[in-house]
Image: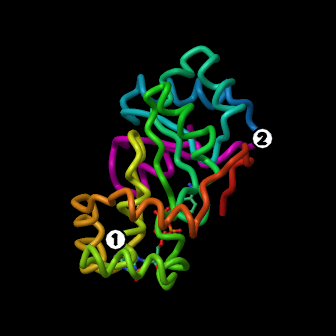
Amino acid sequence: MRACENSLRKLRTDRLDLYLLHWKGSHPFEDTIEAMTHLQRDGKILRWGVSNIDVPDMEKIVAMPDGVACEANQVLYNLGERGVEFDLIPWSQSYQMPVIAYSPIAEGRLLRNPVHLKIAEKHDVTPAQIALAWTIRLDGVMAIPKASSSAHVIDNFKALDIILDEDDLCALDATFPPPTKRIPLAGW
Ligand SMILES: NC(=O)c1ccc[n+]([C@@H]2O[C@H](COP(=O)([O-])OP(=O)(O)OC[C@H]3O[C@@H](n4cnc5c(N)ncnc54)[C@H](OP(=O)(O)O)[C@@H]3O)[C@@H](O)[C@H]2O)c1
């Protein structure tokens, strides 16, 4: 409750649209959910969700009183970190709970890969735009790239219009293989 009050003050606002638990901490989920529910009733947040929470803990959260009100899970997801495709994304889709991909451009690390560059050239866009278009290709997955220039923000917005075809997806799968077994949630 105190953390939310501090954030409201720092942001100079009286209400947050979506408030996330950053990661599993020392407090039991029950207490966090109770606090989120209070904040929602008080009108300080419209919705709440979580971040960096893997499937076994998500199962616990949705089974708790008011736990199904969890609106989103923000996790690490990009071409180089595809573990969540095996279980977390399908699980979230079954609950119609959006997955928010953080570091969708892998902090810029994947942008010089030759396959990536070739696909960008084919679509006449940048490698960052291909990374974003790929990240949001699945139902219920959105991305939050960090960009510190207007030019990058505009480029990233335009990635919504890129449609990757089967050839693109196969080439990317060959270079950045999808998971074949459960991998515990990664994060940074
Ligand atoms: N929930 C969590 O635990 C967690 C953990 C990590 C990050 N996050 C959040 O995830 C968001 C983004 O993650 P991130 O910053 O780690 O990684 P990211 O968005 O994958 O990468 C950011 C890097 O990509 C560059 N970039 C952005 N748009 C570009 C474009 N169109 N062309 C070329 N380069 C571009 C940025 O450069 P410029 O700065 O020059 O634009 C920056 O160097 C942040 O809002 C962060 O708070 C959440």
Q: Is residue 3 magenta?
A: yes
Q: Residue drawn at (48%, 23%), measured in percent from left and top?
A: 69
- Please state which of residues 37 and 141 is positioned toward the viewer in this rendering: 141
Give the residue number, with chain letter if any, for mark 2.
26
Q: CA distance from mark 1 to mark 2?
A: 38 Å
Q: Is residue 177 above or below residue 21?
A: below
Dot 1 alpha-carbon crowd within 10 angstroms: few under 14, some 14 to 19, many 20 or more: many
Q: Which residue is mark 1?
A: 129
For residue 70, above or below residue 120: above
Q: Residue 63 or 106: which is nearer the viewer?
A: 106
Q: Farthest residue toward the top?
A: 65
Q: Is residue 110 magenta?
A: no
- Residue 120 at what x, y percent from top left? 34, 77
Tell me the quarter of the image containing the C terminus: bottom right
Q: Furthest-front residue in view?
A: 167
Which image quadrant is residue 29 in?
Answer: top right
Single out the mark in the foreground, 1 or 2: 1
Q: Earlier in the sequence, mark 1 or mark 2?
A: 2
Find residue 67 and report its horizontal and vertical position in percent: 57, 22
Quarter of the image with the N terminus in it: top right
Query: In percent of the image, x 27 and y 77: which residue is there?
Result: 125
Q: Is mark 1 within 8 Å of ligand 1?
A: yes
Q: Relative to residue 42, is residue 3 drawn left or right?
A: right
Q: Nearer the viewer, residue 150 or 178?
A: 178
Expressed as whole percent of the image width and height from the top left, the position of residue 16 reads 37, 43
Query: Which residues lie in the magenta part?
Result: 1-25
